[in-house]
Amino acid sequence: MILELVAVGLVVSAFLAVYLDGAVYSVASLASTIILVAILYSLNNATLVGVFQLAIGVGTLAVLFLSGEMLSEKSSEKSSEKNPLKNTFLAIAAALLLSIPSIFLSVGIIPTHVSSSVSFPEALWNLRAIDVVLQGLVIMTVALGIAIVLYDKKEEKD
């Protein structure tokens, strides 16, 4: 049952990431998609893959948020839609309809008694050290970029 709920949440959040107009809302939906994929990996006894998915997802989301804020045009007009909440609920209903196959055609967790001989610190630093360091560099760069964007917005208001 948990896998089915995660699968439904995955389909709905991925659908909303594509459907929603605002960059912030799309990035938030994409964040939930990445978190649900990491949970799905963890439920299938691939915890290390789930952790790496989260680590890579954080950098990806930061880059997308920063580029979405910097490159999107800000319109001063209000949205021309009469009822955007109704349209969002229709989109969620369509996503739920698309997720019906994941509910009825799901495959259960196959119990395995195979243990990995690789510990988490060893996998993190000996096997993926360059990825982890570069991911940290990307996150620091994006944090600096966000700080610059917020500083520029503050200057514009003053």
Image: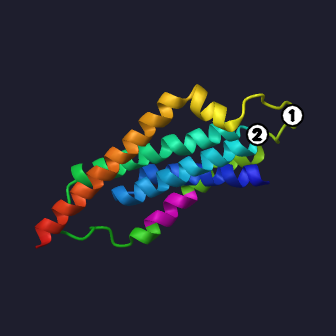
Q: Which mark is residue 123?
A: none
Q: Residue under circle 2?
A: 45
Q: How many marks?
A: 2
- The magenta span reads 87-93
The answer to whether mark 1 and mark 2 are in CB contact below 8 A is yes
Q: Residue under circle 1?
A: 112
Type of the residue with mark 1: Thr
Q: Is residue 84 left or right of residue 118?
A: left
Q: Is residue 139 left or right of residue 146?
A: right
Residue 118: % across, % down? 73, 29
Residue 19: % across, % down? 43, 53
Q: Is residue 101 visible?
A: no
* Nearer-the-camera pick, 95 or 151: 151
Colour style of the rendered protein structure: rainbow
Q: Residues within 10 Å of mark 2 (few under 14, many from 20)?
A: some
Residue 27: % across, % down? 42, 53
Type of the residue with mark 2: Asn
For the point 36% across and 47% down, which residue is it? 140
Q: For the C terminus, which image quadrant?
A: bottom left
Residue 82: % across, % down? 34, 72
**Residue 45 lies in what quarter of the image?**
top right
Q: For the N terminus, which image quadrant?
A: bottom right
* Nearer-the-camera pick, 104 or 156: 156
Mark 1 vs mark 2, CA separation in Å: 8 Å
Up/down of 116 relative to 74, above or below: above
Q: Is residue 155 left or right of residue 42?
A: left
